[in-house]
Image (cartoon, rainbow, N blue to C red):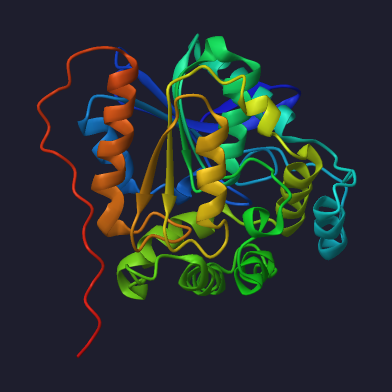
Amino acid sequence: MPIAAVNGLQIDYEVLGDPSAPPLLLVMGLGMPAALWPDELLQALLDRGLRVIRFDNRDSGGSTRLAGARGMNVAGAILRALLRRPVPSPYDLDDMARDAAGLLDHIGIESAHVAGISMGGMIAQVLAARQPQRVRSLVSIMSSTGNPQRKIAFGKRWALQAILKPPPPAGDIEAMVQHLTRVFSVIGSPGYPIDPVAIRPHFERVARRGLYREGTERQLLAILGSGDRRAMLRQVTAPTLVVHGAADPLVPLAAGLDTANHIRGARMEVVPGMGHDIPMPLTTFMAARIAEHCQSARNTPPTSFPPPTVPGPPSPPA
């Protein structure tokens, strides 16, 4: 992947598709490299006429790893956020949104459609609010507003524990694959359980990009330190689609509904059986929803793609 010098950092990124196609910037979530975006989703987006840019956020994958917050008290930081007290952080979501804008500058793109997942959705929201001229449309996936209300801010304790469990040492690909399989078996989609054999090549690619505990902790501090963004979200003017899984154990559905309620004109899509991941059976559906939203934001007649359908979760065994 090429490297962009952005805001004094090195940002690892990749551009896919026709340079003349409408650009779509994909922003990844907490602690994960851009390799977590499913290849099937990327190909479906390319097939639907988009130019796709994905990148590793600061403190993840091949991008710059910063310093500070080692050994932080995560529980204490979460408690401070719930009490609406300031959470000190080495950087915040505004800084990460400026990274995304700087990457677009580096590539030579004035504005793009932007889709973010989880923390990436928060970064995309901030970019759309702070620099509206850069965002043609916004897709916020399984994300939130920073609303500190307990039933909105946090999902199940066991889901949070799963994502904060330290990853194995870098370079141990087998252990990393097993770690990712365990994490996404916990936070993933109950309607579409992980097949460890089928998902293995995908997780191997993620493992090779690397997971970084201290970076994940700093990114979590960035989320908590950014506080309640509901007032900011009222400034978003980009056409917005909010997508959330009905069965998300990590960022509850209430957070997605709260997001849609605070962005003027936002459309809400609730996906049955989906948790805090994009399972393989839903990649075509998700690509269709994203591409159609980008298309509608361009005010052009829709291309004659077959209508997307949400695959029904498997029936329980008799």
Count the marks: 0
- Above-or-below relation of 305 to 127: below
> Would residue 63 be found to the left or right of residue 289 on screen?
right
Residue 11 in sight here: yes
Please name the residue shown 66% across and 18% down the image. Answer: 130
Residue 240 in picture, x, y percent from top left: 44, 28
Q: Which residue is rendered at x = 25% and y = 38% of the image?
A: 288
Q: Is residue 56 visible?
A: no
| Residue that extends furthest to the bottom in the rendered view of this protein | 318
Q: Report the front residue among 218 and 211.
A: 218
Q: Position of residue 235 (x, y in %)?
A: 62, 19
The quadrant in which the C terminus is found is bottom left
Toward the viewer: 210 or 216?
216
Question: Residue 28's x, y, as percent?
Answer: 53, 42
Looking at the image, residue 200 sits to the left or right of residue 182; the answer is left
Q: Is residue 219 left or right of residue 209?
A: right
* Quadrant in the picture for residue 144: top right
x, y percent for residue 286: 31, 44
* Above/below status of 269 relative to 267: below
Question: Which residue is at 77% across, 46% downward?
Answer: 224
Judge whether 277 appears above or below 240 on screen. below
Residue 292 in which image quadrant: top left
